[in-house]
Image: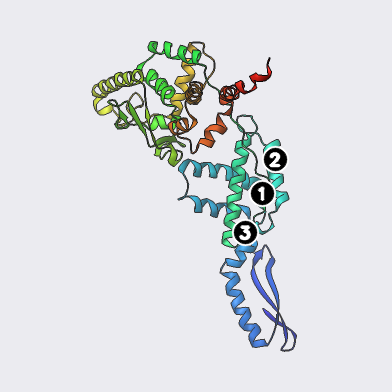
Amino acid sequence: MSVMELTKNKKYKIEVVLGYNGERRIRHLETFYGKKSEAKAYEFELRKKLLNGTDFQKRNMTIKDLSEEYFKYKQDTIEKKTYINYGRRLKLVIKRIGYVKVREINMKILEDFYHYLRHKYITRKGTPLSPTTIQHYYALLNGMLEYAVKCGYRDDNPNKKIDKPKRAKPKKNSYTLEQAKKLVSVLPNEPLKYQAIILLALDSGCRRGELTGLTWDDIDFKDLKININKTTQYAYGEIYEKGTKSAHSVRTNFILPYTAEVLKKFQKEQMEKKLLLGSKWQGSKRVFTTDYGADIHPDTLTKIMKKIVAKYDLPPLTLHGLRHTNVSLMISKGVQPQVISRKVGHSSIQVTDQYYSHFFEDEFRDATNSISDIFAVNEN
């Protein structure tokens, strides 16, 4: 009986069977005070409410269930590469805490999960996770639990009570002026494609994806300008175009005549190859393409830089290190931080100062020395 009278026409026990776990019934029990007719009416409405999935789902939803729902929810709101990375990270979340009910997840369970990521988990490459990757897991779980609160599955988000993991502070490796000069001096021995990639990276301070996203229409040879307004990325078998890192990253940069001349020669060489290949040319309008005219994999630029550095016994430096070199050389020449920030597409001057504060040390020293005359009165 779903409505059992405990006290005549006054108190009732209401039972709703939600399902079975093997032979064991999963039940929802409530005590109701009132008339029998009212108890039956309440039982009818309660049954509808519980069995339509809403309350039952809220009570029994696991982290695995939540992750699947959240994954679908985010599909159309985030970048493709981020979405794919979500899916990869959710596999580990499900493996470790997927069985936990959403309403029972707490700070201790989450702390134990982060401890596992920091001290026990080893990647397929045999390395521990970086602090930055652990922060990505934190952000993912935080987003999931915020979504759970929004949907009414929980009243609070226990992840907010945990200190956000700190990102690893990347080391800003760069070349000195002498090292940069040596790099430029050896480039004429290399293919025009290699020359164009490295010179443009060093001259413009562009990010790798910004370089691979450039089309010939973005280059103004007359006024020596390039328009940076898109990037390309590679995600699991596909190269695709996307916007720049932020709205501030959309910008116009000036390039040196020497860089422009190399780009012109490279463009001519590319056109000749296009005519030679005919229908085999893949038709990309990018500045940098494969040998058959398809969009180039961003990692190809990294490999070219690594090859050049090793060949000429230069200090190790990534392609992104050319961006840091561009910034450090501008700082050494006294270029104002506001100008640097706009040139390289930082979201604010504060970002420039934070990322490159160690390069400004000489400027700080000069600032101190600029008032040294004040103290000269006590030197005699």
Circle 2 or circle 1, nearest the eye: 2
User: Residue 134 is drawn in which quadrant?
Assistant: top right
Task: Determine whether label 3 and label 1 are within 8 Å by CB.
Answer: no
Q: Quadrant of the C terminus?
A: top right
Which residue type does callout 1 highlight?
A: Ile
User: Residue 46 is drawn in which quadrant?
Assistant: bottom right
- Which residue is nearer to you in this view: 3 or 23? 3
The disc placed on residue 61 is 3
Image location (x, y in percent) of residue 81: 48, 40
According to the picture, the residue beneath numbered tag 2 turns out to be 116
Badge 2 crowding class, 10 Å Cα cut-off, few under 14, some 14 to 19, many 20 or more, is few
Which residue type does callout 2 highlight?
A: Tyr
- Which residue is nearer to you in this view: 29 or 112? 112
According to the picture, the residue beneath numbered tag 1 turns out to be 97
User: Residue, x 54% and y 15% (percent of image)?
Assistant: 315
Tell me the CA gap for discs 2 and 3: 24 Å
Q: Earlier in the sequence, mark 2 or mark 3?
A: 3
- Could you say whether the residue bearing mark 3 is in a helix, strand or loop? loop
Image location (x, y in percent) of residue 338: 47, 33
Q: Quadrant of the N terminus?
A: bottom right
User: Residue, x 54% and y 18% (percent of image)?
Assistant: 316
Image location (x, y in percent) of residue 213: 38, 33
326 shown above or below 44? above
Q: Earlier in the sequence, mark 2 or mark 1?
A: 1
Decide if residue 50 is in sight here: yes
Badge 1 crowding class, 10 Å Cα cut-off, few under 14, some 14 to 19, many 20 or more, is some
Q: Earlier in the sequence, mark 3 or mark 1?
A: 3
Tell me the CA gap for discs 3 and 1: 13 Å
Task: Determine whether label 2 and label 3 are within 8 Å by CB.
Answer: no
